[in-house]
Structures are given as structure tokens and as C-alpha cells.
Amino acid sequence: MKTAKEKNVEEKLRDLYNLQLIHLRLDNITNLRGELPLEVDDLKDEIAGLEVRKASFENEEDTLTQLIIDNKEKIKVTIELIKKYTKQQDTVRNNREFDSINKEIEYHNLEIELAEKKIRDAGFKIESKSNSKITLTEKLDSLKNHLSLKTKELTTIIAETEKEEAILLKEIENFEKEIEPRLLNSYKKTRARAVNGLAIVSIERGSAQGSYFTIPPQVQLEIAQRKKIVVDEHSGKILIDEELAMNQREKINKLFAK
């Protein structure tokens, strides 16, 4: 078998075009998946963010619930103190003692009012957070259902195409070994710049495929002779004749029809 450097121009062109045809088949699989992988990742990220928010709501609810419990207990203790001070008023010996005890009772009544206010405020906050959590939970459920459908869709596509994809990747590896590094690097750079992934195009009705610029007859003749690699001056793509392109398409189609 000839090495990459020992091959003539026509053989190099055939190898390059074969590689492109296989790359295009792989592109079709990628296009079939479309934006699904990104959609699935975005949904996962959004769900994770909402789960964090939900956990935060629950922690805040727990804190507020404990605050209500603590203040209710404080009210109970304070009521007992007020009862104690009220009872002491019956045994005071002078107005000074009475006023002192009365101030203590007033102070503890204010403490009860403050505790009751904290309980009411906490109750309102719990109700608000509970409503927000219900809305958030509904959104989470909807997103999880959507993620499940998208994941199944992606899994189905991957299952249907992973065998072909593995074969294509192996063939790409094999064909790349047949092409000299300098030519292969040039092909990869051109393909990376091309919107449609085409680095090699055939001549169609006197112009390069996808181009409106007419190629001079002399250049067309050189391309048909396959004695030198001709690059389109407008797009930077390698040019081949239509017959070579058609022959290689048939061979690749037969290769993957097996």
C-alpha cells in the first residue's frame, strides 16, 4: 500500500473527498441531535437552581416556625411572671413597691405584645413563602417532566445513531492516516471555517458548488486532469471535477450500505 506521500494527486483528492463525505455523514447525526444536548443541560441547570431556592425556602420556613415556637414559650413564661407580680401587689407595704412591681408588669406585657407581633409577622412570612414554594414546586414538576421527555428523545436518537457514529469515527481515523499531515491540516482548517462543513467542492455548471463565480475553462481543464490540487481563489476550498465527486459518493454510499 502506498504511503500518504507516495500517492499521486488524484489519489490524494479521492482520499480527501472520501474523508469529507464521511465527515458530512457524521454532521448529519450531530444535526439530528440538534440543540437537544444543550437543551437537556440547560434544563438540568435550571432545575438545580430551583431546587436550591426550594431548599432555601424550606430552611427559612423552619427558622420562622422555630421563632414562633420560641416566642409562644416566651409568652407562657412571661404570663406566669405577670401572675407572680400581680400576686405580689397584694402584699406590698408601700406605694414605691407597688409602682416598682407595676412597672415590671407593664414591661412584661410589652414583651408579650412584642412576642405576639413576632409570631404574626413570622406567620405572614411562612404563608408567603409557602405560596412561593407551591408555585416553585409546580414549575419544578413541569421542568422535570419536560427534561424527562427531552432526555428520552435524546437517548432514543443516541441509541439509533451511536453504532453508525462509532463506525464513522473509526473510518475518519482510518482515512486521516491515508492523508499527509500538511494536506490534512489544510482540509481541517478550511472545513472549520465553512458554514456547511465543505472543504472540497466539485464543479457544477462551470462554477464551484455553492458559488456564483465562473471558473475559467483552463482552470476547469486542470481540475479535470487531476494533476494538481486546485484551490478556489474566492472560498479557499479545494476544487474537484464532478465525475470524481460522483464516483466517490457512490463508493462511500456502498461502503455504508453494507
Image (cartoon, rainbow, N blue to C red):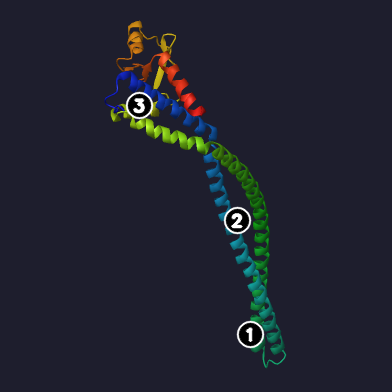
Identified at 49% across, 24% down, the residue is 254
The disc, 1 or 3, on the residue closer to the chain's N-terminal end is 1
- The residue sitting at 45% across, 17% down in the picture is 246
Image quarter for residue 193? top left
User: Which residue is pictured at 65% across the width and 64% down the height?
Assistant: 122
- Identify the image quadrant of the N terminus: top left
Circle 2 crowding by C-alpha within 10 Å: few under 14, some 14–19, many from 20: some
Amino acid type of the residue tagged 2 in the rendering:
Lys
Distance between the Cα atoms at labels 1 and 3? 97 Å
Labels 2 and 3 touching (C-beta < 8 A) = no
Which labelled disc corresponds to residue 54?
2
Q: Name the residue under label 3.
A: 187
Amino acid type of the residue tagged 1 in the rendering:
Ser
Whether residue 27 appears in this view of the structure is: yes
- Mark nearer the viewer, 2 or 3: 3
Query: Which residue is outermost to the top?
Result: 217
Q: Earlier in the sequence, mark 2 or mark 3?
A: 2
Instruction: Choose between 56 and 212: the one closer to the eye.
Output: 212
Q: What element carries label 1?
A: helix
Residue type of the residue flagged with mark 3: Tyr
CA separation, marks 2 and 3?
A: 51 Å
In-front residue for pair 99/85 = 85
The spot of residue 9 in percent (x, y) is 31, 19
Distance from disc 1 to disc 2, alpha carbons, whole Å, reads 50 Å
Camera sees residue 194:
no
x and y, in percent, of residue 111 in the image:
64, 74
Above or below residue 152? Residue 15 is above
Q: Name the residue under label 1.
A: 100
- Between discs 1 and 2, the one toward the N terminus: 2
Front: mark 1 or 2: 2
Q: Which residue lies furthest to the left in this view?
A: 6
Q: Where is residue 26 in the image (x, y as percent from the top left)?
A: 47, 31
